[in-house]
Image (tube, helix red, strand yellow):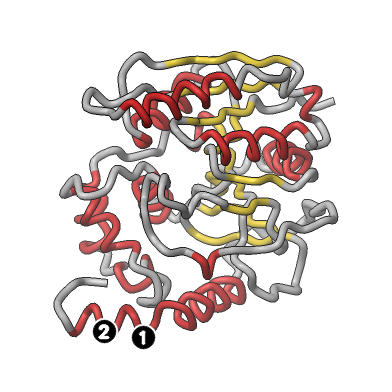
Amino acid sequence: MQPLAPIVLFVYNRPETTRQTLMALVCNKLADESELFIYADGAKNNASEDMRGKISEVRKIIREKQWCKKVAIIESDKNKGLAASVIEGVSEILKKNNSVIVLEDDLITSPHFLKYMNEALNRYVQQDDVISIHGYCVPINYKQSNTFFLKGADCWGWGTWKRGWDLMQFDGTKLRDTILDQDKKYEFDFKGTYPYFDMLEKSIKKEVDSWAILWYASAFIKNKLTLYPSRSLIKNIGTGADATHKQNKHFMQVELTDKPVIVDEIPIMESKEARKLFAAYFFKHLGLRNKIKKILGLGY
């Protein structure tokens, strides 16, 4: 039997979503055979008593049950922020393990998520063109196979190997300059339908605390691929007032698949059909808004 990848969960100050995330995870096939590492970020120096209370409640919740076969809890005395927490945590786990599955405290998993992730991680472990495995998919009608590849990487329920994470570039300016030098901004933004480049610019300016845009850009400029399921195994419930990045992403909501996603034998190349469907979906929901913002000089 192939080894199971350790699971890493990042939590902070959202007790309700944290509990839902853990309750869904414990219902996964393979949860009772897996090792879970929970990283709990600390309070900011100026945190209110209410905020400190929420952080304390989260730390009680993560101890309520034996969520997986083994559970290790790593608590920070200070606030690192989401980006630093994820980067440090994933890097730490991959020093001792060849692969990892990554979750945050607002992701509901299908009971079939862990099985799909481990099967895919084991299948593509030797394929250098594949940088990661993703569990979420926007609600598109992709019928060619159960899975497909897109160039880049993603952040809602994902996994990678040490060799993949080693390609992470932490300098956003270098990533931006490379995209511009390669004249790939339009492609980077899914034919101008999603403001990824704007997110990268904001990350460089420290206006957002995002590791995910660096991960996507790092994979994109190296022409690396991420495997996606055609039916989503992840649902994001973190768009409320306590979300780290407060933005309206209602159009990204999906229904979890109630069936396993088979990891098919497919060509290791980007699916043109899937990229077309993603771009069409983004344009449908963001096209007019993006045009108005651009006209007003607000970027995307």
Q: Is residue 248 left or right of residue 179?
A: right
Residue 161 point in image, percent of width and height: 56, 33
Disc 2 to disc 1: CB gap under 8 Å: yes
User: Residue visible at 33% across and 45% down?
Assistant: 210
Q: Residue at x 64, y 69 (%)?
A: 139
Dot 2 amino acid type: Ile
Residue 199: which quarter of the image? Answer: bottom left
Mark 1 crowd level (few <14, some 14–19, many ≥20, 10 Å Cα): few
Q: Amino acid at mark 1?
A: Leu
Query: What's the residue at 27%, 72% (across, down)?
Result: 300
Figure label count: 2
User: Relative to 161, is 74 above or below?
Assistant: above
C-alpha gap between disc 2 and disc 1: 6 Å
Left or right: 82 with respect to 1? left
Helix, strand or loop at mark 1: helix
| Image coordinates for residue 145, horizontal then vertical, percent | 76, 66
Q: Which residue is label 2 attached to? A: 292
Element under label 2?
Answer: helix
Quadrant that contains the N terminus: top right
Which residue occupies the foreground of this view, 82 or 22? 22
Compared with 294, 4 (above or below) is above
Give the residue pinned by disc 1: 288
User: Percent from the top left, x then y, of residue 242?
Assistant: 41, 45
Quick one: 272 or 170, which is closer to the camera? 170
